Amino acid sequence: MKTLFAKEDRYNIKTYAKVPIAVERGQGSWLYTQDQKAYLDMYGGHAVAGTGHCHPEVVEALKEQLERLIFYSNSVYLSVRAEAAQALIEKTDGLMAQLFFVNSGSEANENAIKLTRKITGRSIVISFTGGFHGRTYAAASATGIEKYRRLITPLVADHIVAPFGDLHEVERLLAAGNVAAVILEPIQSMAGIRDFGAEFLRELSLMCRKYQSYLIFDEVQTGVGRVGGFFYATKHGLEPDMITMGKAIASGVPMGALLLSEKIGAHISSGDLGSTFGGGPLAAAAASATVQVIEKQRLLLKVQEGSQKLKQALQQLCFVEEVRGEGYLLGIKVHGTAADYQKRLFARQILVGTSDDPSVLRLLPPLTLTDEEIDHFLAVCKEL
Ligand SMILES: Cc1ncc(COP(=O)(O)O)c(C=O)c1O
C-alpha cells in the first residue's frame, strides 16, 4: 500500500488532501481496500455515487454500450444520447425544454454564465457568499468562498458576490438593469449545508423576472435525487430559467448538463456551444440507466425516509449541535471540530466529508443506502 501511495504522489500533482486508503473496488455503499477492509461510504464518492458504487444495472448499460460504440461526437445522431436527454428533461416536469451535455459541473456553469451574457447583452453575474460553482474561470469567479477565488486572480470581470440571503442587496443590484444572471446552489454544500429556503428562492425568482435577469440553479449536488426530489427546483415548485447538473448524473462516468427553459432555448444559435466529449455514448448510457434505477427502486422516497431517520437520530446525540439540509445532502454541526469527528469515524471505517465550515460534517451517501447501513452508521455515531 505504501508503494501505491508513493507512486501516486510521485506522478500525480499532489494537490488533494487524500484519505489514506487504497480503494480496490466498490459495491453499493461500500468501498473495499487493498488491505481487505470495508468502508461505509457516507460521502458517496464525493456526491457522485448516487446509485451506489457499481450499480449492476449501470454496469450492464455501460458494458452493452462499450461493445457497440465507445465514442462519437455531437456531429452525428446517437439514439443513446437522445434517450438520456429525454429522460433527464422529463424529470423536470415541463420546467425545462432542452439540454446541452458537457463533462463536469464547472463546464455546465461556464456555459450557463456565457449564454446568459450573450442572450441578454448584459455582463453582470450575481452569486452569493458561500456558493461553490467550480474551478474554471467563470465558475470560480462566481464562487463565493474566498480561498477558491484567491487562486484565480484576476477574476473574470463583472462577477458580484452578494451576501448570503440578502434579498435587498440583490434587488439593489438587479435594479441597475445590467444583470445577466443570478447563479446559486439552492442548498450550499461546500459552505456547510446552508439552505436559502424555498421562500427566499421564490421571491428571488420573481425579482429576476421583474428585472429580466436569468436565474440559474446550480443543482450539481442537489440534483439527481439527492434532496429527495429529482431536482430541488421541482421538489419545491420553483422555476429557475436554467439548471446545471454534474456529479451523480451518470453514476460516476464524467458528465455534466445545462438544462434550459423553452424561452432560453429559442435564443441559441448553431455553434453557440460546443464540447467534444459532451454527451458521449458511455456517459449517456450511464445517465439513462441512472434515471431508470432511481425510478425503479423508488429511490426518491427511500431518500426522504432515510433522511428523516438519520436526522431524528443524529439530533439526539450529545456531540451534535444541529443537523441541516434535505434528503441525503446533510450537514452535522458538531460541538468541536468536524475534522476530529471525521477522523474518529474513519478509524471505525466510515467515510464522511468536512466542509468550509470547520464545525460541519457533510453526509452525501448513495441514494441506495439501506436501512441496515443507516443503523450501522448511527450505532457507530452513538459510540463516538
Ligand atoms: C455545487 C457545485 N457546483 C459545481 C461544481 C463543480 O463541478 P466539477 O468539479 O464537476 O467541475 C461542484 C463540485 O464540487 C459543486 O459542488
Image (cartoon, rainbow, N blue to C red):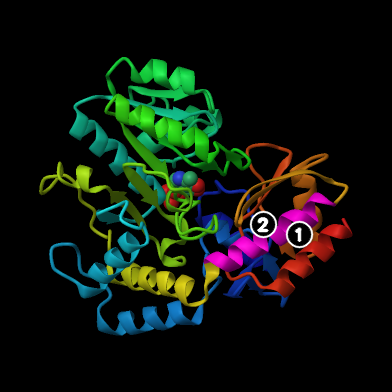
Q: Which mark is residue 19?
A: 2
Q: Mark 2: give few (<14), some (14-19) or many (20+) Cα within 10 Å.
A: few
Rendering coords of residue 66 (x, y %): 32, 80
Q: Magenta span covers which residues?
A: 300-316
Looking at numbered disc 1 in the image, what kind of residue is underneath it? Phe
Decide if residue 337 is on the left or right side of residue 170.
right
Whether the magenta-drawn stretch holds residue 279 is answered as no
State the quadrant of the C terminus.
bottom right
Q: Secondary structure at mark 2?
A: loop
Choose mark 2 or mark 1, whichever is in front: 1
Decide if residue 11 is on the left or right side of residue 376.
left
Q: Which mark is residue 376?
A: none
Whether the magenta-drawn stretch holds residue 307 is answered as yes
Decide if residue 277 is on the left or right side of residue 167.
left
Looking at numbered disc 2 in the image, what kind of residue is underneath it? Val
- Residue drawn at 23 percent across, 57 percent down: 276
Marks 2 and 1, how far apart in space? 9 Å
State the quadrant of the N terminus.
bottom right
Rendering coords of residue 338 (x, y %): 75, 44
Front-lying residue, 153 or 366: 366
Decide if residue 23 is on the left or right side of residue 175.
right
Q: Mark 1: give few (<14), some (14-19) or many (20+) Cα within 10 Å.
A: some
- Residue drawn at 72 percent across, 67 percent down: 374
Report which quarter residue 272 is drawn in.
Answer: top left
- Residue drawn at 24 percent across, 38 percent down: 115
Report which quarter residue 351 is drawn in.
Answer: bottom right
Rendering coords of residue 44 (x, y %): 59, 62
CB under 8 Å between callouts 2 and 1?
yes
Residue bearing the label numbered 1: 346
